[in-house]
Amino acid sequence: MEQLSTFAGWIWNYGILFLLVLTIVVFIHELGHFLVARWCGVTVKAFSIGFGPELFGFNDKRGTRWRFAAIPLGGYVKFIDDENAASAPGTGKTDTMPAAEKAGAFHAKPVGQRAAVVAAGPIANFLLAIVLYSALNMAVGIRVMPAYVDAVLPDTPAARAGFIPGDKIVEINGSTIEKFEDLQRIVGSNAGRELAFVVERGGSTITLLVTPNTDEQKDAFGRSFRRGLIGIQRSISADKIKIESVNPLQAIARGVSETYGNITASLAGLRDIITQRQSAEQLGGPILMAEVTAKVAELGIEPMLRWVAFISANIGFLNLLPIPVLDGGHLMFYGYEALRRKPASERFQQMGFQVGLALLMMLMIFVNFNDLLNVWRRWTGTG
């Protein structure tokens, strides 16, 4: 009974808040598809938040069914000639439609319009992230902690490279370092790779070559991950930390930069998992996301909105992966069609969607297994 009560408390404290965040991000994603589809004259049969049986919904004046479904882990926009919620083309379905219906058929539209409709979902996610980051930057300013070195740990890559307290790191491998977090991000993802640091010291600049060590660590949820470390400590003195006010253009530019940084960090993470620089065990699913959401919410509204922006940017990125059942898979087929001046065969596309769905299901099973295993280890004290 106590375990059941604990589980119910977990659902309330973690799950509900996460589902609210996910619903907002999914709604914006699907709204991007919906608006551009309407603009291109496509007939939209359904706009669904969630999958499975409908809980409630309504029809708008154009006949689109707006529905909320029982499994709230995603959503879809379904067009008049779609075979399924993944917008797979039905075999010969468009050819047999009456002329009035065919005018609104998605798969009868020019390839450029179809690509625009598909790309609109991820673009909407990126725009949401940019808007949130930009609004926060204008509202609260930008907290800047330049990468000053306060201490150098002995017998570390930084010590061997010649760093000394008071150094200011301004560039790594051609990337400008505006704050200490930029340094952490680059060093953390480049363990074992030589990096060129440009350092300001005594009014002049010097270049130091450093190869970060690989350090095995655990996050707050018990998941193992590897990161690069060079052995320096940041300066946290008040005169080294400042809040910069920005105008709207600067806030938007920073919002774009932060969104782009989310995407490149995701790419780097995938690269490191594929090359086995990082363990695939750190991949998490809804349970991990729910736990992180709850912890971020405890920090206040600003961190929470930045977390929503982060999730939105990453959902946009993941949907652009070239897996046929995702938006990126559709765009891959449309690219083929644009180059060859004819679409891939329906049989080939159907096979692609089946393979893509299988890959997606395998990934979902894997990340959910990681989540459940991690929860079990924490509850039983075995990890």
Image (tube, rainbow, N blue to C red):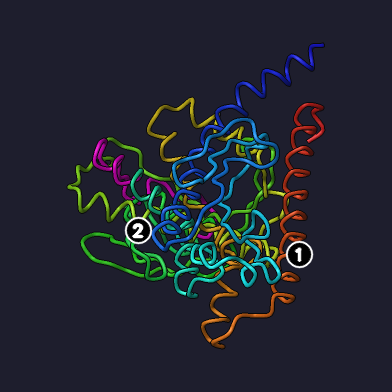
Task: Name the kind of residue labelled 1 in the image.
Answer: Gln
Q: Residue at x 27, y 52 (%)?
A: 252
* Mark 1 touches mark 2? (CB < 8 Å): no
Residue bearing mark 1? 354
- Corner quadrant of residue 362: bottom right
Image quarter (top left, top right, bottom left or bottom right) of the N terminus = top right
Q: Residue at x 53, y 38 (%)?
A: 23
Residue bearing mark 2? 177
Residue 234 point in image, percent of width and height: 40, 45
Residue 256 point in image, percent of width and height: 34, 56
10 Å crowding of disc 2: few (<14), some (14-19), many (20+): many
One can see residue 36 in this view: yes
Residue 367 point in image, percent of width and height: 72, 47
Circle 1 — which element?
Answer: helix
One can see residue 158 in this view: no
Task: Name the kind of residue labelled 2 in the image.
Answer: Ile
The residue stretch that appears in magenta: 133-159
Circle 2 — which element?
Answer: loop
Question: Nearest the camera: 351 or 279?
Answer: 351
Q: Which of pointers 1 and 2 indicates the residue nearer the eye?
A: 1
- Corner quadrant of residue 235: top left
